[in-house]
Image (tube, grey):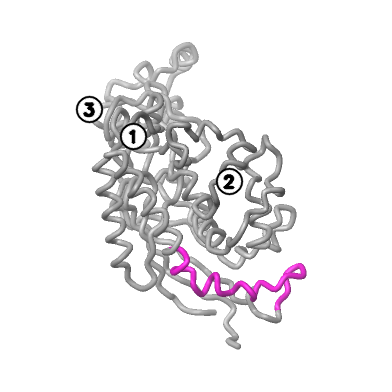
Amino acid sequence: MSAELHTDYRLTIETLSPVHIGSGARPLLRDYDFLVERNRAIVLDVNRLLAQLSDEGLDQAAEDPRLDRMLPAEGVEGWKAYELDIASGDPQRIRQHTKDASLGFYIPGSAVKGALRTAFTWYAHHGALTLGGLGERNNPGKAGDSVEAALLDHDPRNLQRDLLRALRVTDAYPQGEVRARAVAVDVFSLHGQPPSLRPKGQPTYVEAIPRGVVLEATLTLDRYVLRPERRVRGLHHSRKRHFFDQMVDRCREFIGVLINLDLDFYGDCGIWKLQAFYETLVKRQASLQPGEFLMPIGWGTGMLSKTIATKLTSGELSTIAETYDLERWQSPVFPGIFPKTRRLVGDTLARESLGWVKMRMEGLGVG
């Protein structure tokens, strides 16, 4: 048995489509947090702007806090926090991407680990789903607890039992400056025969890391936890060590199913631009080098990428939809398609999928 305690990997992430990881902060408001000039949104440092106001100016700002009322004569440049390219449209509100203290855009390690967790769960699931453990009807966030408990030893009351504690991922930072974008995203739903995708409402604008950005993180595998002689709260995690040893292959298997499903979906809808994108993903998947795999991460990637739904029967999906009031995702016109919606970049026309990245793992050594 090797005496190594952990193995470190350099994790390189290349964005293949816009990636949005929500910060949880309130949306930015036009004229109060940002101004629009030509095709860019200029987000201002409002606190610094307020600090330069006189007492009279502060009283006026309390009554009318619009930015153009507070800006000095020299304009916005001296008060700019950062700016966003506007892909299209006229945003009034923009949801914020997670950023560090210096307002730098990054991908949290938790987002990467969450995507890996889904792939592990999907790979480990075989046979019928234990629907009796789905949880309360009004709490879909706990729908997967029984599945994760069975497959990954997950216990929300005792995280020391969780198999994925053996995997640690740092936040991924870009190599160089990122020119983030404000992109319009809408929910598109199937309609008519032949089927087509139509937007359901007004688009939501989000800050996004654009495609073509390279970020780096460190992934650490804690091999001490996985030793045969180690017991964690009575569990032998070593029995599932193969999850980690074959992690890249398992991710490729999971993603291959997702890509082919969406390729067929957009082909049937006649969305040629998206069909071409997924055809490109098929080619990328076939030409991956050792240690590389594709993955959808972040907001807007859809239910299929965040669950084991592609391994469930139609009966199991129907039970879940009924239990959690998800029937609105189903349609009598398209009974074999679930879900019948996709969240996509675009307002009137669907243009891009969200969140696709290519990851590459390179060994850095053991300790």
Closer to the N terminus: mark 3 or mark 1?
A: 3
Q: At 64% across and 46% down in the image, what residue appears?
A: 143
Identify the residue position indicated by label 2 in the image.
315
- Front residue of this view, candidates 201 and 75: 201
Q: Is residue 121 left or right of residue 211?
A: right
Quadrant of the drawing holding the C terminus: bottom right
What numbered label is drawn on residue 38? 3
Magenta segment, principal secondary structure?
helix
**Disc 3 and disc 1 in contact, CB within 8 angstroms:** no
Q: Position of residue 249 (x, y in %)?
A: 44, 69
- Stretch in magenta: 230-251
The residue closer to the viewer here, 25 or 321, is 321
Q: Which mark is residue 195?
A: 1
Q: How many marks?
A: 3
Residue ID at (61%, 72%): 240
How far is the residue under mark 2 from the one under mark 3?
51 Å
The residue at the far bottom in this view is: 1
Q: Is residue 341 left or right of residue 233?
A: left
Task: Examine the rendered structure and indicate whether residue 359 appears above or below residue 226.
Answer: above
Q: Amino acid at mark 2?
A: Gly
